[in-house]
């Protein structure tokens, strides 16, 4: 039996995934209502710049066991007003004032909307006049511009959190909460379908370490996640330990070391941990960075970090965790999250149990903006009844094979290195626009992947060059000190 037509669609999130989902849905010209709910005050997702200093971290056990982002209690009768909630919801972004993209603008751009060519003097100095990287403000303006066109902003309700999305009969019931200055306002709306574009880089993951909670209590703000890093100035002359071997930990440790802002050396917890597959571990080879194995415990009284090899780092002022995120969806209690991924998503988009629930952005790093676009168009075509979806059995077989090949964890969500196959599979499933209606997906261009990888090489070259300069500077200083003694 065919399903009734989808006419009312809710989109959760107005970051890059939500922005392109709006356009893909609107261009299908078949939906009566498209409503977008964004819990922040503006569009941009993790590219929004927070002006206030981030909150201190609490409840470390929940961050370690990935249970920190729990649902708010829903008033028994709706609509309702309640006192403004003070529960942490981890909505802060990971932007700091001088943050720039670490990926070439070409693979970050949507296919029809190029990212502006604005370049900072800092980026030009590091990478030359053709630098492909962009300041975070360029990225936020870019995302906002996608929503401000065609009056799409009229579709968005800001400061509005989807607290619950549940299927009631053939409809999706959304319980919504809008933050006011003193009150929270709750109500419900009903839809035929839901597109989840809320991202999964919000709730910090911090591993369980004995003494860490007490260390933070004794010096509030001394333990942060990389998403709360707001620039090197907060760490002037402080002894810092940076935990993590991937991108954010590398950028922060390098920034603190090369600028000579922190007490030197900057200590990193990298030995025995795999470096990021795209960027490598060159950043950690800076001569003013000292690498260590895992932390065994922290003594809050002496501020000593004890290491797995029996050694220790005394008098530590700050510990910064670049240890990734926990994927949470408290608004979808009936949808499982397993091993930090959402199972039963065909092509990372279509929820096999119910194709009126779709995801944009449920993938790991790599050509992400363009992947969002392909996924958004597929989601829009599915809801418009124009996609070429296979049977549920075939969808399940796709997931089972992927689990066999990549495992049932985060690696499942990585499209790398099969970008061309994935883009073309999704494009085939979405199909072409009919009678000029719908957003057109071009064929995959290998130049996107080439630019993506070339950008990584630029960053690696930068680290090698600056590491060499720092070593030579240190050698000259040592020679000068010897001469002074003579």
Image (cartoon, rainbow, N blue to C red):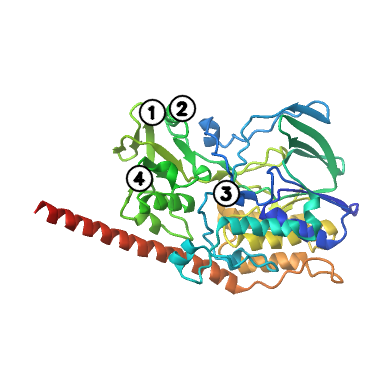
Q: Residue at x 62, y 66 (%)?
A: 116
* Disc number for residue 217: 2
Check disc 1 and report its element: helix, strand or loop.
loop
Between 241 and 135, which is closer to the camera in this rendering?
135
The mark found on residue 300 in the picture is: 1
**Spatial CA span between label 3 and label 2:** 33 Å
Instruction: State the mark number for residue 409.
Output: 3
Of mark 3 and mark 1, the one earlier in the sequence is 1
Disc 2 on helix, strand or loop? helix
Kind of element beneath mark 3:
loop
Residues at marks 2 and 4 touching, judged by CB atoms closer than 8 Å: no
Whether pointer 4 and pointer 1 mark residues with C-beta atoms closer than 8 Å, the reply is no
Q: Residues within 10 Å of mark 3 (few under 14, many from 20)?
A: some
Give the residue furthest to the left. Answer: 486
- Front of the two marks 3 and 4: 4
**Position of residue 287 measured from the top left corner of the image (x, y, whole percent):** 30, 54
Foreground of the two, 56 or 449: 56
Point 32% across, 34% down: residue:
315
Mark 3 or mark 4, earlier in chain: 4
Question: Do the residues bearing badges 3 and 4 touch, measured as CB atoms within 8 Å?
Answer: no
First reached walking from the N terminus: tag 2 or tag 1: 2
Determine the CA span between mark 3 and mark 1. Answer: 34 Å
Distance from Cα at disc 2 to Cα at disc 1 = 9 Å
The quadrant in which residue 111 appears is bottom right
x, y (%) of residue 44? 65, 52
Estimate the spatial distance between the alpha carbons at disc 2 and disc 4, rounded to whole Å.
22 Å
Q: Are marks 3 and 1 in contact (CB under 8 Å)?
A: no
Mark 4 — residue? 267
Q: Residues within 10 Å of mark 1 (few under 14, many from 20)?
A: many
Q: Nearer the viewer, residue 179 or 385?
A: 179
Q: Around disc 4, counting alpha carbons within 10 Å, would you say few (fewer than 14), some (14 to 19), or many (20 or more)?
A: many
The residue that appears at 60% across and 39% down in the rendered structure is: 90
């Amino acid at each position: 039996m065919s399903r009734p037509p989808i006419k009312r669609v809710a989109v959760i999130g107005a970051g890059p995934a939500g922005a392109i989902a709006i356009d893909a849905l609107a261009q299908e010209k078949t939906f009566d209502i498209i409503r977008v709910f964004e819990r922040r005050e503006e569009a941009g997702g993790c590219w929004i710049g927070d002006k206030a200093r981030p909150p201190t971290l609490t409840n470390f056990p929940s961050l370690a066991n990935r249970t920190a982002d729990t649902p708010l209690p829903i008033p028994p009768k709706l609509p309702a007003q309640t006192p403004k909630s003070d529960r942490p919801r981890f909505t802060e972004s990971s932007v700091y004032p001088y943050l720039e993209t670490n990926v070439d603008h070409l693979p970050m751009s949507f296919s029809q909307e190029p990212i502006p060519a604005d370049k900072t003097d800092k980026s030009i100095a590091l990478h030359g006049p053709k630098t492909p990287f962009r300041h975070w403000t360029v990225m936020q303006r870019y995302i906002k511009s996608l929503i401000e066109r065609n009056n799409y902003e009229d579709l968005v309700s800001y400061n509005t959190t989807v607290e619950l999305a549940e299927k009631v009969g053939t409809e999706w019931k959304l319980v919504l909460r809008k933050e006011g200055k003193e009150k929270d306002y709750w109500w419900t709306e009903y839809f035929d379908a839901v597109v989840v574009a809320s991202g999964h880089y919000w709730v910090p993951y911090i591993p369980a370490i004995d003494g860490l909670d007490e260390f933070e209590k004794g010096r509030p703000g001394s333990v942060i996640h990389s998403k709360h890093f707001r620039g090197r100035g907060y760490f002037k002359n402080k002894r810092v330990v940076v935990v993590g071997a991937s991108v954010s930990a590398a950028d922060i440790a390098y920034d603190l070391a090369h600028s000579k802002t922190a007490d030197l050396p900057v200590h990193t917890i990298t030995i025995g941990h795999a470096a990021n597959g795209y960027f490598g571990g060159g950043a950690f080879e800076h001569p003013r960075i000292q690498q260590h194995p895992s932390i065994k415990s922290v003594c809050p009284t002496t501020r000593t970090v004890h290491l797995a090899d029996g050694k220790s780092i005394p008098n530590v002022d700050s510990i910064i965790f670049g240890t990734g995120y926990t994927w949470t969806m408290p608004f979808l209690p009936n949808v499982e999250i397993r091993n930090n991924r959402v199972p039963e998503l065909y092509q990372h988009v279509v929820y096999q149990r119910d194709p009126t629930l779709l995801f944009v952005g449920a993938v790991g790093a790599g050509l992400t903006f363009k992947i969002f676009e392909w996924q958004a168009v597929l989601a829009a075509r599915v809801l418009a009844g124009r996609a070429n979806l296979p049977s549920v059995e075939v969808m399940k077989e796709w997931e089972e094979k992927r689990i066999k090949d990549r495992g049932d964890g985060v690696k499942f969500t990585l499209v790398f290195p099969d970008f061309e196959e994935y883009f073309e599979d999704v494009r085939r499933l979405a199909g072409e626009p009919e009678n000029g209606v719908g957003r057109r997906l071009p064929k995959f261009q290998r130049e996107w992947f080439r630019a993506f990888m070339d950008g990584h090489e630029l960053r690696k070259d930068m680290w090698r060059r600056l590491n060499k300069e720092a070593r030579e500077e240190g050698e000259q200083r040592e020679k000068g000190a010897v001469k002074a003694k003579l």
